[in-house]
Image: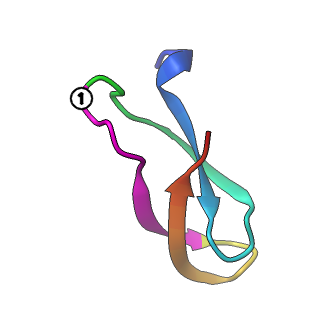
Amino acid sequence: MSQDNLIKLECNECHRLNYHTYRNKKKVKSRLETKKHCKWCKKHTLHKETK
């Protein structure tokens, strides 16, 4: 996994960085948004890609 394809996912409610993942930036131009479990909020929340 190359360093330039790594992204960080941030919780929308508590604004903590919970997940690291990757995406193909040449094919996917928009920012990633997924529902994931936040261990600080203790529920499933929307996580968005940060810069």
Of the pair 33 and 41, the residue shown nearer to us: 33
Q: Is residue 30 magenta?
A: yes
Residue 18, image quadrant: bottom right
- Magenta stretch in the rendered image: 27-37
Of the pair 1 and 14, the residue shown nearer to us: 14
Callout 1 amino acid: Lys
Q: Position of residue 38 (x, y in %)?
A: 63, 71
User: Residue 16 vs residue 23: left or right?
Assistant: right
On screen, 43 above or below 40?
A: below
Q: Residue at x 36, y 27 (%)?
A: 25
User: Residue 24 vs residue 45: left or right?
Assistant: left
Of the pair 19 and 30, the residue shown nearer to us: 30
Question: Which residue occupies the extreme front position in the image?
Answer: 30
Q: Residue at x 62, y 70 (%)?
A: 12
Residue at mark 1: 27
The quadrant of the rendering that contains the C terminus is top right
User: Residue 37 vs residue 18: left or right?
Assistant: left
Residue 28, image quadrant: top left
On screen, 4 above or below 29?
A: above
Q: Position of residue 50 (x, y in %)?
A: 60, 46
On screen, 29 above or below 26?
A: below
